[in-house]
Image (cartoon, rainbow, N blue to C red):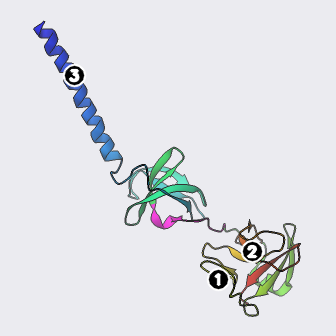
């Protein structure tokens, strides 16, 4: 009987040791700063895929890659890094690569800005494309967050969308353009079949 009792105690002790080892491993793999609450919704901002790492270190193992404008759940981990969840995968990405809203998708322009300026009217994608200048219409009443002029001369918002006017589409609608960036509707007052591009020339 004595031998059986000691053997039973020995097995129970081994179970506690194994449980303790598992807990220690989980504490190492999952940072204590990450819990089930406090996550924000964000989007991948670079045009090319970014890397999600197992640890907050670019030399760490890559968990997966995330494409432009993919939605993620994130929370700050340490300076310059976010802890990110996407589907059943989680890991760390550089904080500068996550924005709070989607950014304009860039592409090779079908028409250059100089050609558009010269022609004045183009037909593409089922729309009639024209332009109007902020030099003539400053648009002080338009609510364009992060308003700026990009290097091609298009008035854009903080996420890189070219600012458009449309009477057919509601404000905030995102459309593809032939100019190298996606556009977003911020204004109206043009023909129903027209998308009017806000420019600075």
Are circles 2 and 1 on residues that touch, CB within 8 Å? Answer: no
Does residue 168 appear to the left or right of 157 in the view shown?
right
Between discs 1 and 3, the one toward the N terminus: 3
Write down the quadrant of residue 190 in the picture. Answer: bottom right
Mark 2 vs 1, N-terminal side? 1
Element on which disc 3 rests: helix
Residue depicted at 64% across the width and 77% down the height: 157
Where is mark 3, residue-wise?
A: 12
Range of residues picked out in magenta: 94-105
Residue found at the far left of this picture: 2
Residue 138 image offset from top left, x and y in percent: 71, 90
| Disc ID at residue 151 | 1
Q: Residue at x 30, y 41 (%)?
A: 25
- Assign a secondary structure to mark 2: loop
Q: Calculate the distance from the C-alpha at mark 3 to the C-alpha at mark 2.
A: 70 Å
**In the picture, which quadrant includes the N terminus?**
top left
The residue at the far top in this view is 1
């Amino acid at each position: 009987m004595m031998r059986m009792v000691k053997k039973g105690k020995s097995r129970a002790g081994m179970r506690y040791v194994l449980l303790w080892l598992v807990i220690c491993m989980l504490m190492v793999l999952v940072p204590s700063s990450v819990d089930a609450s406090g996550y924000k919704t964000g989007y991948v901002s670079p045009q090319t895929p970014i890397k999600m790492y197992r640890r907050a270190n670019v030399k760490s193992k890559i968990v997966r890659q995330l494409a432009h404008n993919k939605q993620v759940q994130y929370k700050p981990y340490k300076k310059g890094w976010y802890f990110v969840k996407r589907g059943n995968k989680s890991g760390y990405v550089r904080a500068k690569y996550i924005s709070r809203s989607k950014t304009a998708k860039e592409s090779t322009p079908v028409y250059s800005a100089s050609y558009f300026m010269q022609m004045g009217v183009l037909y593409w994608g089922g729309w009639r494309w024209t332009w109007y200048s902020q030099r003539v219409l400053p648009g002080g009443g338009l609510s364009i967050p992060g308003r700026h002029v990009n290097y091609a001369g298009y008035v854009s918002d903080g996420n890189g969308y070219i600012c458009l006017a449309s009477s057919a589409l509601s404000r905030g609608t995102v459309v593809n353009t032939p100019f190298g960036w996606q556009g977003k509707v911020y204004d109206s007052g043009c023909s129903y079949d027209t998308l009017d591009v806000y420019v600075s020339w």
